[in-house]
Amino acid sequence: MTSGLAEAWERYWHDLPTTPGAAPWDGDATAHVAEHVPLFEPYFERDLPLLDIGCGNGRQTLFLGTCFPRVIGLDVSESAVERARAGYVPDNVEFRRLDLLDTAAVADLSAELGDANVYMRAVLHQLPPESKLAAAANLARLLGERGHVFALELTPEAGDLLDSAAGEEEGIPKVKRVMGYGIVAAQWSDLNERRLLEAAGLRLLETGRVTLRTTDRLADGSPLDLPAEYAVATRA
């Protein structure tokens, strides 16, 4: 990522309480990745490693490890990776630091692993517009010839909802904590997820709309649920 954004994520994870659910996306896996697996499992060849990009503290990664033979959680924050490693980690799961915008590091990982599948939840949307295509191109490199990606991203409507909620004195405290580090959600301008993946040389096989549940709450106490879209894609 840009050095400033990578540093922001490192500070965020370093400062974040270790309480489960402290991050807005850190819900129980049964309400998150478990709902996504049926959408991409038919496409993912099981002899390929599965990369969870933006794994955070690894809660969702560990669930993926119950479904696939080899899973590697990757995050730009070393503090997040350390948290993920601190708990119980089965033999078929590991955690590493990786910056998706570090082309040399991505090339090294691709050379090491060969083709890979990718699960990526809400990563591209928070990158600056000028960095999105580079990230998508590196994602395509990781797939190789046989890999597939399941990419789930917040929509522009989610950004509008968050902006409105953030303007209220009460509500979404966990998202406001993220914003306090200069991290901005749902930055799409005129480039949406589908166009971005296609511009990186990926072929869309399936797309759809889902709801991204969070552990945060609106001012009236109702759950903060965000509109999102997903795409399953492979190299064109």
Image: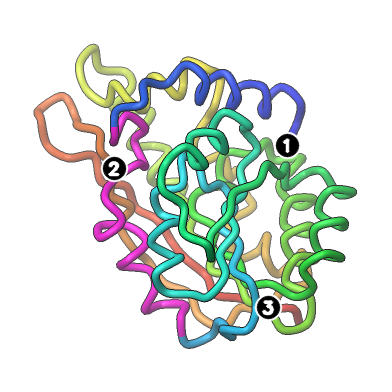
Q: Which amino acid does label 3 sit on?
A: Gly
Label 3, on which residue? 147
Closer to the camera in the image, 195 or 141? 141
Residue displayed at 32% across by 66% down? 34
Which element type, helix, strand or loop, lies under badge 3?
loop
Residue 54 is situated, as x and y percent measured from the top left of the image, at: 56, 47
- Left or right: residue 167 versus residue 207 is left
Report which quarter residue 81 is drawn in. top right
Q: Which amino acid does label 1 sit on?
A: Met
Eye-nearest disc, 3 or 1: 3
Residue 162 drawn in magenta: no
Q: What stretch is highlighted in magenta?
A: 20-41
Residue 79 is situated, as x and y percent measured from the top left of the image, at: 57, 28
Closer to the camera in the image, 117 or 178? 117
Which of disc 2 and disc 1 is earlier in sequence? 1
State how far apart marks 3 and 1 are (Cα).
23 Å
Which element type, helix, strand or loop, lies under badge 2?
strand
- Left or right: residue 92 versus residue 2 is left
Local packing at callout 3 (Cα closer than 10 Å; few below 14, some 14-19, many 20+) is many
Which of disc 1 and disc 3 is earlier in sequence? 1
Which element type, helix, strand or loop, lies under badge 1?
loop
Residue 74 is situated, as x and y percent measured from the top left of the image, at: 62, 49
Q: Which residue lies furthest to the top in this view?
A: 169
Report which quarter residue 136 is drawn in. bottom right
Label 2, on which residue? 214
Label 1, on which residue? 1
